[in-house]
């Protein structure tokens, strides 16, 4: 799968046919499965640097990513992202 950043961790959502890849440089790569042999990159969603892992709740399709820094300062929190469908160029967004 094409990605501009090296992925630290990844997780899939079979219901949406997506793969999310956490890149410690500060993006979550979002990929769509077109068929079992073909994936396409939807976007590099910007997040805080040092996000090394993520998890997908396949029932709600939410993406959970732990942050360990914000603007260079230490934090310890879980950020939740919601999938977006039908909006060109936007594929996940911060949850509530």
Image: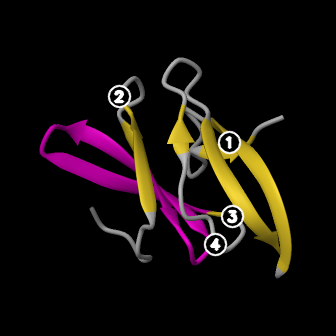
Separation of marks 1 and 4 at Cα, in angstroms = 17 Å
The residue singled out by tag 1 in the image is 81
Identify which residue is drawn at 29% across, 41% down. Answer: 33
Specify the segment rendered in magenta.
20-45
Separation of marks 3 and 2 at Cα, in angstroms = 23 Å
The residue singled out by tag 2 in the image is 14
Nearest to N terminus: mark 1 or mark 3:
3
Helix or strand or loop: what does disc 2 sit on?
loop
Separation of marks 2 and 4 at Cα, in angstroms = 26 Å
Colouring scheme, one of rainbow, by chain, secondary structure, one colour: secondary structure
Q: Which of 44 and 60 is in front in this view?
A: 60
Nearest to N terminus: mark 3 or mark 2:
2
Label 4 crowding class (10 Å Cα cut-off): few <14, some 14-19, many 20+?
some
Residue 52 locus on image (x, y percent): 55, 64
Separation of marks 2 and 1 at Cα, in angstroms = 17 Å
Asked if residue 47 can be seen in this view, the reply is: yes
The residue singled out by tag 4 in the image is 50
Q: Which of 92 and 69 is in front in this view?
A: 69
Would residue 28 be found to the left or right of residue 13 on screen?
A: right
Residue 42: say if magenta. Answer: yes
Residues at discs 4 and 3 in contact (Cβ within 8 Å): no
Residue 96: say if magenta. Answer: no
Nearest to N terminus: mark 2 or mark 1:
2
The residue singled out by tag 3 in the image is 47
Label 2 crowding class (10 Å Cα cut-off): few <14, some 14-19, many 20+?
few
Identify which residue is drawn at 55% across, 32% down. Answer: 85
Nearest to N terminus: mark 2 or mark 4:
2
Asked if residue 71 can be seen in this view, the reply is: no
Q: In this view, does 29 lie above or below 49?
A: above
């Amino acid at each position: 799968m094409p990605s501009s950043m090296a992925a630290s961790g990844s997780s899939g959502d079979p219901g949406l046919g997506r793969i999310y890849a956490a890149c410690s440089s500060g993006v979550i790569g979002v990929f769509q499965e077109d068929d079992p042999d073909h994936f396409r990159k939807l976007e590099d969603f910007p997040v805080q640097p040092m996000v090394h892992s993520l998890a997908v709740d396949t029932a709600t399709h939410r993406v959970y990513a732990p942050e360990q820094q914000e603007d260079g300062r230490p934090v310890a929190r879980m950020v939740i992202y919601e999938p977006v469908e039908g909006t060109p160029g936007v594929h996940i967004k911060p949850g509530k």
